[in-house]
Amino acid sequence: GELDNNDTYEIGTYWNFKITDKFSYTFEPHYFIRVNDFNSSNGKDHHWEITNTFRYRINEHWLPYFELRWLDRNVEPYHREQNQIRIGTKYFF
C-alpha cells in the first residue's frame, strides 16, 4: 500500500498519581502500530514511546516539571535507543 504518515494506530494511556498536595507523577506509555508495510524507525511494524513526568506545585501560579521520555531503538544509523529530557515550568494566570 501507500506509505502515508497516517498509516499508524496509536494507543496511549495516562496514569496520573498525586504523591502529595504539591508533588505529582504521570506515567504515559504510547504504543504505535504501523500498517500497509510501513515500518517505524526501529525496523518493525510497532514501537513504544514512554514518558515520565514529575511536577511540583509551588503555588497556584507556578508549576515546574521534569520530563523523561524513552523512544524505541533506531535501526539506522546507530542502532541506539533515544532519550529526551524536558525541563520547564507552567504559569497559570
Image (spheres, grey):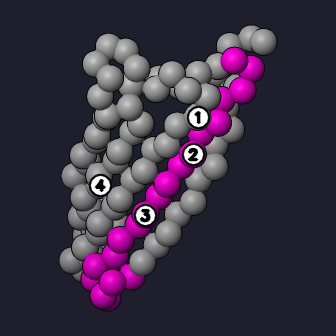
The reply to whether callout 1 and callout 3 are in contact (CB within 8 Å) is no
Q: Position of residue 88 (x, y in %)?
A: 24, 54
**Residue lying at 41% horizontally and 36% vertically, measured from the top left:** 72
Q: Which residue is mark 3?
A: 27
Circle 1 or circle 3, nearest the eye: 1
Q: Position of residue 89 (x, y in %)?
A: 25, 59
Q: Position of residue 53 (x, y in %)?
A: 34, 61
Circle 2 or circle 4, nearest the eye: 2
Side (left or right) of 75 relative to 80: right
Amino acid type, residue under disc 4 in the picture: Glu
Q: Decide which of 42, 83 is in the foreground and name it.
A: 42
Q: Which residue is mark 2?
A: 31
Circle 3 or circle 2, nearest the eye: 2
Question: Magenta segment, which residues?
Answer: 18-37
Disc 2, SS: strand
Is residue 19 covered in magenta? Answer: yes
- Residue 14 appears in the rendering: yes
- Which quadrant would residue 74 be assigned to in this image? top left
Measured Cα–Cα span from mark 2 to mark 4: 18 Å
Residue reaching furthest to the right: 1
| In the rendered image, the vertical position of residue 19 relative to residue 5, given as above or below | below
Amino acid type, residue under disc 2 in the picture: Tyr
Is residue 82 covered in magenta? Answer: no
Amino acid type, residue under disc 1 in the picture: His
**Residue lying at 28% horizontally and 19% vertically, measured from the top left:** 78
The reply to whether callout 1 and callout 2 are in contact (CB within 8 Å) is yes
Screen quadrant of the N terminus: top right
Q: Which residue is mark 1?
A: 46
- Badge number at residue 67: 4
Disc 4, SS: strand
